[in-house]
Image (spheres, grey):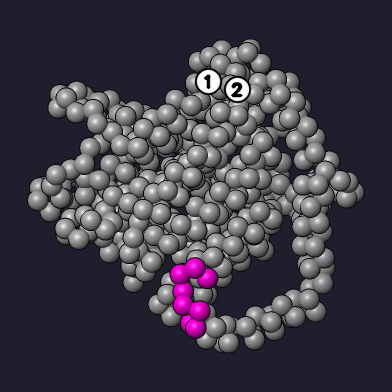
Amino acid sequence: MALVSPSSSTASEKQLPWPFRYKGLSLGILTFMVTIVWRVLTVSHFTLVIGTIEVALFALLMVWVVWRLVQRWMADDWGINGFEIYVLLLIILPLGSAFGARKEFGQPLIWGIIAFKDYYLLLGVLAVYHWLRMGWVTLKQLEKAMLIMSWICLIYFYFATLFINPAPYQDTPLAGANEVKGGGVYYRFNMAAMYFGAIYYSARAFKRETWFDLFYAMLFAAYVVIFRLDRTSMAVTALGMAGVVLFHVPLKRIVRAMMVVLIPLIFGVVLIFLLAPSKVKQYEDMFTDAIHTVMGTSGGEAEVGVRTLEIAIADRQVAKHPWLGNGRISHTWNETGYEQWLGFFFPADVGMLGLTFIYGYPGMVFLYLLFAVAAIYMLRVKGRNDDLFFITCQFLLLALFLDSLTNGQLTQNPGQALLLMGVMHYYSRISPAVVQQGALLSAPALA
């Protein structure tokens, strides 16, 4: 299905396919693929355009899959590795959920499958993995592509937040308002690219002692903390940035840096407490509300009641369909979605429980297995502690895992973690033995 077998020759020993002969063009294609597969701009002012592109890309990926099957058949080569087997099983996972939706909501099976059309963009991960395996692109190019994607998102997110009023989009996937978060309308952009930028530049600042990179890291982190106003996103960004430094930077260098950074940091925190006490109170209320939601107690806030109601709905439906789940409702078949049967309910709002609601317990466990398998691949990699891209992907995987526990990370964007899993598998295959033989070398540092 991934339709790729180890190549006996490197890209330097044979002519590259036309698009990959030109570094700028191949980098552009890679950036486009990662941006669409990660779905970082699906919730944006360009939703309709991105949706059209997703459908077109899905069609191209299906043609590619058929072509690879034909190639495999002609070569009588059906060998696949563990990562490819996992992706193959992941691709067919929604079929069971489509049966669940037919049983619970009466949705025809075909519409239950169509409801997961965005899910099949996961085939794009196989395409990127194939390009890496064939030597058509390198890890350095993938790193650059992800940085370009992150900067595009950062610039657009700041521009939209500062210059485009979100109020007309309130109560849509693009924007919302919450009393706990200050009552104002804010954009609900996907934060995966912000995680990547914050973690990457934190690592680069300390590993290379290029301290201006901390400014870049703070730009990415500041959007999450000041504008996105999602508590889990704040926490995982902080953990990712701190973790990549604490685990991969010598203690002496950390102490030396903190002596320079700590005093301005303390000064800044004190200044915020003095000049913006209402903002401090807002964040205090946000996290207090989160604790009430987790503990199931009432804190007097509307969000606690809404989340508690959604959790109760999910619990009830999971109890009814623990094995196949309840699937998704195609808005083409029923434009109100779950509302007709369940009222106000979005699986992405309740994290892991929402994932179980859609796929059932077996599907939920299988999706979370992604992180465990990626960790196994990660542990097989040796001699990469100075590889910025590798260590960034490590802690980005951790951030995505933690984010998925309470947010819709895996319910809406499994391609983000799956691509990182593929990267870890590729690293495990080229390090150290293949690298020592001089094949498929990569230089992931970015100037």
Residue at mark 1: 96
Residue at mark 2: 323
Image quadrant holding the C terminus, namely bottom left
Q: Is residue 247 magenta?
A: yes
**Dots 1 and 2: beta carbons under 8 Å?**
yes
The answer to whether any part of residue 325 appears in the image is no
Counting from the top left corner in percent of width and height, residue 255 is at 55, 83
Counting from the top left corner in percent of width and height, residue 215 is at 52, 75
Q: Which residue does the image show at 82% across and 49% down from the upper left?
A: 292
Asked if 251 appears above or below 188 in the picture, the reply is below
> For the magenta stretch, what is the residue range?
246-253
Left or right: where 155 falls relative to 179: left
Left or right: where 90 falls relative to 183: left
The answer to whether any part of residue 265 appears in the image is yes
Q: Quadrant of residue 323?
A: top right
Q: Is residue 178 magenta?
A: no
Label 1 and label 2: CA atoms lie apart by 9 Å
Question: Callout 1: 10 Å neighbours few (<14), some, many (20+)?
Answer: many
Asked if 223 appears above or below 90 in the picture, the reply is below
Q: What amino acid is labelled 1 in the image?
A: Gly
Q: Which residue does the image show at 32% across and 29% down from the upper left?
A: 1
Counting from the top left corner in percent of width and height, residue 344 is at 75, 31
Q: Which residue does the image show at 77% across and 62% down from the upper left?
A: 283
Q: Tell which of 348 and 433 is nearer to you.
A: 433
